[in-house]
Image (spheres, rainbow, N blue to C red):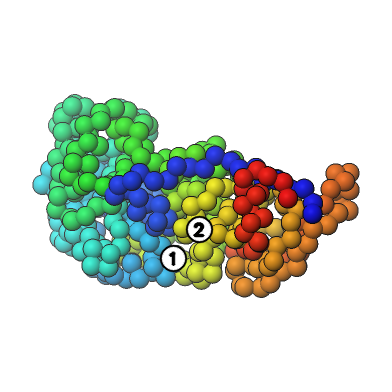
């Protein structure tokens, strides 16, 4: 038998041994960016990016009336897409609050709609056992205590009547946390945003308050301390771009269906299903959760194109989900820049990271014959064999070659293969032995 040895990389330590461990079981979530900015349908940072004063922006509160909002419809669409939890923007940078807060009148109950959106969503989530996470922006362009100084996501400076004071603003935040964490039942996660880009206040008492009110909650790394997990966004971070490097800590990657905006945009440029499924596959294979965003329209419904895209993602995910769920094994080196490998039981899953240019792949880290090779996407059985490849003739070695992959048929989705082996051989490989 040929010599072969799979390199074992460092895998993320995935278990907190407390209530936060739900995060490693439900790995694919729906992100929602929704607020007053849906009225003009331009961008969720409309006030900041257009340089609008409060007077020029806050009048939208009188136009926001999401009469068609139905949280069960949202969750139906999410579940059809294969999603298992939701993260909802309770407050974005404009400071508008999607719940019945007593800390400011700038909230959903003072719109023509008048109902508490978060309460309705929370009720549906709890009834359907669908974990609910809350997004909360640290920058706030409306609160008089927030020290607007023209940084990212801020007004150019204080406006008339403002009383900039970081300490008072922190107390305002804590008062809102108290509402969010006591009035809406179980909250599974808290998703801060943009502290590091603005006031950059480090205060462990803020997350401590959240944990005291919601034991077992998981908190991200964009708030008042390092939190529990990292949040690579739109592949802006090196860790996201490094194709075959596995995440070394709990991570949740996030992306929007739309390329221009996270909130609803009327003439949005949507990512292709192929681009999105490859992005989902790459991050989840590397050990991250994945949060995919939709911006609902002002009436509370999802844009038709996002519904179509999510439905197609769901069709793909139903076929390949076994390659992402309960994946507790170590990641393995494929010795191939465009491929990731992970083991579960007696199988290796092969994640093809890019749109393939050819109908076969060579796995240089393997030189053993699988008992079966399958395309998870459609169940097609593939040809596989250990052979001396003409293009790698200078290596003078035999490698595992898999061919007849239906790359044209599956051009618009991430391709994942399943290789089944004799378990004893895989044990030797993952223990660094040769076979």
Q: Can you identify the residue that label 2 sits on?
A: 324
User: In the rendering, which numbered label is found on residue 293?
Assistant: none
Res 191 quadrant in image: top left
Please give left or right for residue 77 compared with residue 342 in the image.
left
User: In the rendering, which numbered label is found on residue 82?
Assistant: 1
- x, y percentage for residue 92? 29, 46
Q: Secondary structure at mark 1?
A: loop
Q: Tell whether label 2 touches label 1 (CB within 8 Å).
A: no
Q: Nearer the viewer, mark 1 or mark 2?
A: 2
Residue visible at 50% across and 58% down? Answer: 324
Residue at the farthest front position? 424
From this view, report whether residue 411 is shown above or below residue 202: below
Q: Secondary structure at mark 2?
A: loop
**Between residues 343 and 302, which one lies in front from this camera angle?**
343
Q: Give how far apart the Cα atoms at labels 1 and 2 are.
A: 11 Å
Residue visible at 14% across and 40% down? Answer: 175
Which is nearer the N-term, disc 1 or disc 2?
A: 1
């Amino acid at each position: 038998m040929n010599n072969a040895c799979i390199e074992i990389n460092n895998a993320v330590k995935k278990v907190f041994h407390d209530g936060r461990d739900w995060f490693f079981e439900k790995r694919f979530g729906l992100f929602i960016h929704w607020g007053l900015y849906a009225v003009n349908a331009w961008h969720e940072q409309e006030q900041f990016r257009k340089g609008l004063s409060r007077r020029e922006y806050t009048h939208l509160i009188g136009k926001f009336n999401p009469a068609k909002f139905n949280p069960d419809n949202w969750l139906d669409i999410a579940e059809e897409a294969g999603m298992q939890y939701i993260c909802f923007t309770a407050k974005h940078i404009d400071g508008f609050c999607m719940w019945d807060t007593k800390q400011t009148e700038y909230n959903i109950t003072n719109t023509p709609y008048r109902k508490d959106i978060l309460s309705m969503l929370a009720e549906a989530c709890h009834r359907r056992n669908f974990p609910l996470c809350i997004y909360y922006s640290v920058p706030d362009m409306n609160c008089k205590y927030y020290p607007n100084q023209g940084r990212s996501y801020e007004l150019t400076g204080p406006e008339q009547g403002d009383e900039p004071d970081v300490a008072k603003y922190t107390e305002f935040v804590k008062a809102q946390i108290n509402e969010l964490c006591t009035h809406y039942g179980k909250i599974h996660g808290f998703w801060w945003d943009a502290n590091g880009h603005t006031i950059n206040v480090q205060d462990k008492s803020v997350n401590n308050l959240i944990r005291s009110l919601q034991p077992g909650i998981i908190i991200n790394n964009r708030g008042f301390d390092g939190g529990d997990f990292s949040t690579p966004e739109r592949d802006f971070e090196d860790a996201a771009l490094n194709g075959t490097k596995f995440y070394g800590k709990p991570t949740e990657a996030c992306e929007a269906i739309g390329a221009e905006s996270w909130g609803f945009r009327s003439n949005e440029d949507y990512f292709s299903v192929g681009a999105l499924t490859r992005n989902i596959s790459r991050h989840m294979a590397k050990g991250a959760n994945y949060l995919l965003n939709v911006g609902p329209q002002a009436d509370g419904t999802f844009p038709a194109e996002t519904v179509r895209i999510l439905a197609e993602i769901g069709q793909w995910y139903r076929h390949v989900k076994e390659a992402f769920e309960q994946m507790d094994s170590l990641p393995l080196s494929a010795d191939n820049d465009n491929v990731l490998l992970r083991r579960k039981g007696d199988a290796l899953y092969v994640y093809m990271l890019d749109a393939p240019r050819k109908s076969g792949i060579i796995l240089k880290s393997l030189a053993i014959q699988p008992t079966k090779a399958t395309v998870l996407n459609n169940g097609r059985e593939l040809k596989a064999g250990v052979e001396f490849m003409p293009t790698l003739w200078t290596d003078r070695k035999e490698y595992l070659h898999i061919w007849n992959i239906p790359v044209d048929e599956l051009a618009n989705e991430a391709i994942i293969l399943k290789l089944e082996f004799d378990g004893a051989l895989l044990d030797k490989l993952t223990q660094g032995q040769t076979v």
